[in-house]
Image (cartoon, helix red, strand yellow):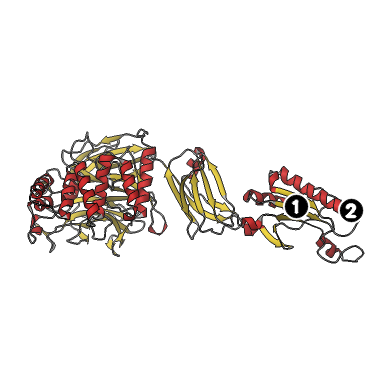
Amino acid sequence: MRFWNLYLLLLIIPSLCFAQQKRSKGDIAFFEYSYSKAITEYQKELQKGPLTSQQYLNLADSYLRVDNYNKASKIYLDVFKKDTIMTASHFNRLLQSIHNTSGMEEVKTFLQDNKQVFSKELLENAEFNYDLLWSESELEPNYALYNVRINSNQSDFSPSFFKDKLLFSSDRPRGSKKVYNPSGNSFLNIYEAEIDPNGDLKSVKEFDGLKDSPFHKSTPYYSEEIDRVFYSLSNANGDQLLFSPKGKNAMSIGMSSSKNSHTYILRDLNTSFHYPFYEAATGKLFFAANFDDSYGGTDLYYVYTNNGIIMSAPINLGPRINTPGNEIAPFVFDNTLYFASDVFYGLGGMDIYRANFQENDNFSIPVNLGPSINSSEDDFGMIIKMSDSNEYVGYFASNRSGGIGKDDIYGFHMLEKPGLKTLALKGMVQRKNDGAVIDGAVVSLLDDEGRIIKEVTAGANGKYELEIPWQETVVLKAVKNRYSTYNQHLNAARLDTINTFKFNLEMVAIDDIVTEQEEQMMIKINKFFFNKSRAEVTPEIARELDKVVAAINSFPELRIEIASHTDSRGSNRYNLNLSQRRSDAIKDYLLEQGVPEDNVVEAVGYGEERLLNKCKNGVFCLEMLHNRNERTNIIILNYNELF
């Protein structure tokens, strides 16, 4: 079934809630989910006069529900041009319609032309996933899915690991369960099945670990750590459904350790809560809900708990995860959030995405798991774990063609995590000499032609994170004023290595390698002395000159002058010649170490022309004063130009 029909199973809005307002026959049919009838009635009403903007949107929604995307998109666009009534959900449906009628490029054009309407996160998510799906469109699935044996001809979905078994939801006829009028099927119930050695399911029976109810019970999650089952259920008092003042009977979330231990933990008669997931490590309970503050339809939230008992108000996961569409079925595995969304940039219907957790409750861009998992229909409710044989095993639900029922549960085994391959790099930008963080550095990934693929700015803590569709080779670059440029070419073998851990980038601060002396900017080295009357580079001198090599490697744009000086002892001519031989020896050493000749603009011997004190010819001076005049300076000629 389409996701919308599944959603109706989890949210009861009986017709009595509209009795207080006068509605047209089209309105009544629409709010009773009779979309074909609503189209017929609205068309009749159009013959008598124009509809309201809201009724036009209802008509567009009705066309969308029956897969008439051409008419749906035309009406959405007409309303968009004339009125500001469109909600975020309507924009998502508009873009779904455009995607189904005109393709991805038309959606991109609409987003670009109306980018002020959408959040930057949504635009980034769309661009990334379009690029990812396009770049991987020719890849074959790298593992096989299988339709599990226990599927019925009804809806079977929301699998959950339960000890050595599996729980799931279904509206299959069973016992005395009443019929839910909007769908004509039985109320949802929770079942358990055994898992055979191959991962297939067998021996289905009703799960008897929960409180009895003649109404909905669905979307279970079992926490092994606290031995509790979390699940959705209809708000009821015994055999009586409970309705809000607005006429709604919504879904709540309960927690149970046995058949007689039920506790309501999330309950609001105007809000439906479903798809609970309990993260024992943090005490967070994730869930889907249709609060009024959502970014679209159903959003994902979490609350802090103490062993499942609510300790905070609901916290929205934010615009990186929640979209103008509907997000459901959160599941956390290996620091990754898996969830389903019907946002417009997917493959169709509900698609399954993954996003990595980051610091401060942030997430990486959600990544579509691609055609190996997702289809053109609804795919949702993924669960995954590592098997004893170090394989990834899991299940999800789908209503793709070729199934047994309206929604079927599918299983999978694989050696790698599910989803299209991406290149994810993260770490810190640090100063090379002491590891201090560098904030504000621009970190880029470039292709072999030097074109920027993705660019981010490191935060105040020096951290950066980049994720792009997989490429075999990239150039990683980081730049910041007064720092060396980080520039590294990475091939596929290297990328496979660094794609799984933090990759810190080290940059050299110009202030760490320069000093101002004699009113000039110079490369910072310790003072050294040649042997008396000699010009050979000794190992001690080489250690200091290697700092010059490192400086030019860090800042290839530096242009230097080698300036050698002697003291006044000896003849002027001899000292001039000796200092020149020393400068030439230093230049030869630098070139031998790989310094380009263009970087060494001059190598000059000044002899005793530029004494720093009064120790000139005929003046008696102590040895220490003469030594001050004997020196070699590595002068940066273009410092002011560069910095």
Locate the C terminus by quadrant.
bottom right
Classify residue 565 by image quadrant: bottom right
Name the residue nearer the viewer: 564 or 621: 564
- Please give the residue where the numbered disc 2 appears in the rendered image: 573
- Please give the residue where the numbered disc 1 appears in the rendered image: 562
Q: Report how far apart the C-alphas of labels 2 and 1 lie in the structure.
A: 19 Å
Kindly check if marks 2 and 1 are in contact, taking CB atoms under 8 A apart as contact: no
Total marks shown come to: 2
- As helix, strand or loop, the secondary structure at mark 1 comes to strand
Relative image position of residue 376 (x, y in whole percent): 26, 39
Classify residue 132 by image quadrant: top left
Crowding at dot 2, Cα within 10 Å, few <14 / some 14-19 / many 20+, comes out as few
Q: Amino acid at mark 2?
A: Arg
Name the residue nearer the viewer: 108 or 486: 108
Residue at 47%, 38% (x, y): give it.
472
Residue at 72%, 49% (x, y): give it.
601
Locate the N terminus by quadrant.
top left
Residue 340 visible to the viewer = yes
Relative image position of residue 12 (x, y in whole percent): 14, 54
Name the residue nearer the viewer: 252 or 360: 360
Residue at 32%, 41% (x, y): give it.
104
User: Relative to 170, is 430 on the left or the right?
Assistant: right
Q: Amino acid at mark 1?
A: Ile
State whether residue 401 is above or below residue 41: above
User: Relative to 352, is 467 on the left or the right?
Assistant: right
Relative image position of residue 94 (x, y in whole percent): 25, 48
Comes first in the chain, label 2 or label 1: 1
Image mark for residue 207: none
- As helix, strand or loop, the secondary structure at mark 2 comes to helix
Residue 189 visible to the viewer = no
